[in-house]
Amino acid sequence: MLAEGTKNVRYAVRWRVLLKYLGVLGIVLAALNSVPLGVAVLFGEFEVAGRYAIVLLALLALALPLSRMTAPGQLQMNEAMTVVVLVFLLGSLVSSYSLGAASDKWLDSWFEAVSGITTTGLSTMGSVEDKPRAFLFARSWMQWYGGLGIVVLSLVLFLRNSVAARRLMDIEATGETLVSTTQIYARRIAIVYGILTVCALTATWLVMDDGFVALLHSLSAVSTGGFSTFDNSLARLEPLAAGVLMGFAWLGAVSLPLYFLIWQKGPSALLHDLELRALLIATAVLAGLLYLWLPANGHGWPDALLMGMSAQSTTGFSTLAVSDLDDASKLAMIGSMLAGGSVGSTAGGFKLLRLLLLLRLLQLLLARAAAPRHAVIEARLGARRIADEDLWRAMLLMVMFMLLIFLSWLAFVAHGYPPLDALFEVVSASATVGLSTGITRPDLEPFLKVLLCFDMLAGRIEIFALLVVLYPGTWFGERSGAL
């Protein structure tokens, strides 16, 4: 009976809807790709510019006709999820051709593009210091707009359908809305992100001599992406410059709506944000542990603090090689990378809010076990009441996240990699961090490169959205009559 009842209310995606909104988002992708095209022309790197010109023309030729299609305003949830997943895939695929100017292997170019658009920062390039400047800019630029979210940019620039916009926003930006209309919310998030970027660039430029290097690192910092123009990341920089960059990267791991709330209600809003408190405590604990465990050969509290901030904010900048750390330090960083930053931020991981919800669920189960049979005990997080459905949904997402990590880790162990290093690498990819023990390299097995790409996409978009796209019922079956 249940199967028969659910069969009638389950609808596959409508092709017209997908094509319409992919067309709109394709125009946004074309606009975003025009920026590195201009940079390539500015630096006289015409081979790279030619590739971007081809991508730009191809996107416009496909996207403009699709964007003019008529489609119903009401999106199904599976359609919204599918659009978001496909636009991230499309963005990485088209960028792989442009980035191919610096690599002779398409898979490495695609890996770089996925790592960029998901704000991860892992790289299979043996060295980046000899790459074209347009290539280096494109990587950081992808992290910047990937951190803000292609969908949020689209809401700001194009989408006028508030119902469709709200569906897409629910998938891409999961923070609590500060206003009732989605477009206003998206604009406010974009403004906060832009101001944070300008502040990061200004501060970084003041402590660095090279404005171009300051720009690229600022884009990667605010997006918690972690791409660097140097092979040894922030270790090349002076401690002050590295500290400034990591400071803004950590600020990127704070919920972006919180900044606007501070503007509205003043600094007192900070005192009521449980995630911010959790982020501060988690960063301090990890930095303290790393300080105790770091080798004594020149590494002190600055390295411990910066590496702790990098792991907890899921940025991926580093001031020392992860391969030099002991097992205890790696395990502590794995835990921090898993938790990640705040909901509504650019950080990855399964988010601190879900960890707080899991702890609250445990507390609730213990309280109900000791309470009288007819007692009513409500779950609360701070002053907010939490529905049981929200608790179980958070737990389900965390379980799926851990299952993804476990299966990916098994594949690396089966290929002969040390278990702890393999776990670190998989968690770094799935939590979109970018720190590496050295496993991610040019001669990594092709299957494992593809697996890490899947992990990065799953971590950025949320594993449930990818499962919806892979579910046959999403594509086949009865479709809604509103075509």
Image: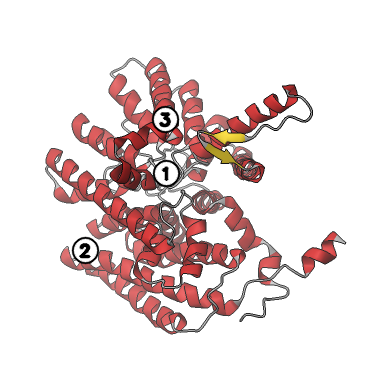
- Local SS, label 3: helix
Q: Residue at horizontal 27%, vertical 64%?
A: 36
* Quarter of the image where one finds residue 394: top right
Q: Determine contact: label 2, label 1, CB under 8 Å.
A: no
Q: Amino acid at mark 3?
A: Arg
Q: Earlier in the sequence, mark 3 or mark 1?
A: 3
Identify the residue under disc 3.
277
Q: Which residue is mark 2?
A: 39
The image position of residue 305, as x and y in percent, is 33, 26
* Residue contact between numbered discs 3 and 1, judged by CB atoms under 8 Å: no
Is 457 placed left or right of 414 in the picture?
left
Query: Which amino acid type is marked by label 2?
Result: Val
In the figure, 277 relative to 2: above or below?
A: above
In the picture provided, is 86 more to the left or to the right than 295? right
Front residue of this view, candidates 256 and 133: 256
- Compared to residue 472, the image places residue 410 above or below, namely above
Q: Residue at x 68, y 76 (%)?
A: 479
Where does label 1 land, which residue?
347
Considering every residue shown, the one lying at the far right of the view is 1
The quarter of the picture where residue 365 lies is top right
